[in-house]
Amino acid sequence: MEEIKQNGGEAIGFAHNVASEDDWIRIVGDTIAQYGKIDILVNNAGISSAVPYLETTVAQWDKVMSINLTGTFLGQKHVIPHMIENGGGSIINISSIAGLTGGSGAGAYTASKGAVRLLTKATAIDFAKHNIRVNSIHPGYIATPMTVDLMADQQMKMWFESQTPLPRLGKTEDIANGVLFLASDDSSFITGVELPIDGGYYAK
């Protein structure tokens, strides 16, 4: 947020639990009060889970679903009415390559990200008549704070790189550039699609 301000932009920040409907109601209301409208929603909050299927508890399953899926549902639910009133908008839901293919040892995570992909399509169809575009982005292996511990292991880092046809890990800027495209008027005739940003992983 400070970086945005230092570069001449304007930003405010709110702490909230994406799985809480009350929190969504509060921050959407505060945003409308500050700026008067919402043009873009990026549902980016998520957690990973690498628990073997038969060892996954209901509590672990529910936690992953509440953040990755319910959080996306609630964000859309409480922003869309304002977008309708404003004549349109763009929603970008961050899924994963795990939302396009099966993954070993991460059943809850894979299920949640696959559900985000199809929730995106359903929402896109329902609200296209209101000029609201809804798309999903599917990152591949990206160097982020969530993967820093894995990437600290050189052998593990080399394995991740070997899975990606373009010979490097993705950067957060790669995902941000995709978000900017889908948020902008340059993508004004694109809705209901999934955009893999994965260095070619899904093409294999």
Image (tube, helix red, strand yellow):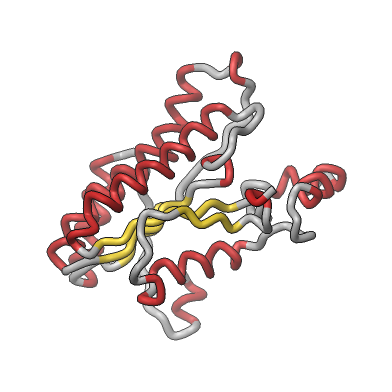
Residue furthest out toward the right: 155
- Which residue does the image show at 75% across and 60% down from the upper left? 166
Residue furthest out toward the top: 54
Instruction: Look at the image and tell me whether residue 168 can be seen.
Output: yes
- Which residue does the image show at 16% across and 55% down from the upper left? 81
Q: Position of residue 147 (x, y in %)?
A: 67, 47
Residue furthest out toward the bottom: 8
Is 185 placed left or right of 104 in the picture? left
Query: From what the image shows, is residue 123 above or below residue 50?
Result: below
Query: From what the image shows, is residue 104 above or below residue 178?
Result: above
Numbered label tally = 0
- Which residue does the image show at 24% across and 58% down from the upper left? 128
Query: From what the image shows, is residue 153 above or below residue 82?
Result: above
Pick the residue in front: 144 or 22.
Answer: 144
Q: In which quarter of the image is residue 129?
A: bottom left
Q: Position of residue 102 (x, y in %)?
A: 59, 33
Is 178 placed left or right of 54 in the picture? left
Pick the residue in front: 140 or 22.
Answer: 140
Instruction: Look at the image and tell me whether residue 14 can be seen.
Output: no
Q: Where is residue 7 in the image (x, y as percent from the top left)?
A: 49, 83
Q: Where is residue 98 in the image (x, y as percent from the top left)?
A: 57, 40
- Which residue does the image show at 60% across and 14% down from the upper left? 54
Is 180 placed left or right of 79 in the picture? right
Pick the residue in front: 57 or 183.
Answer: 183
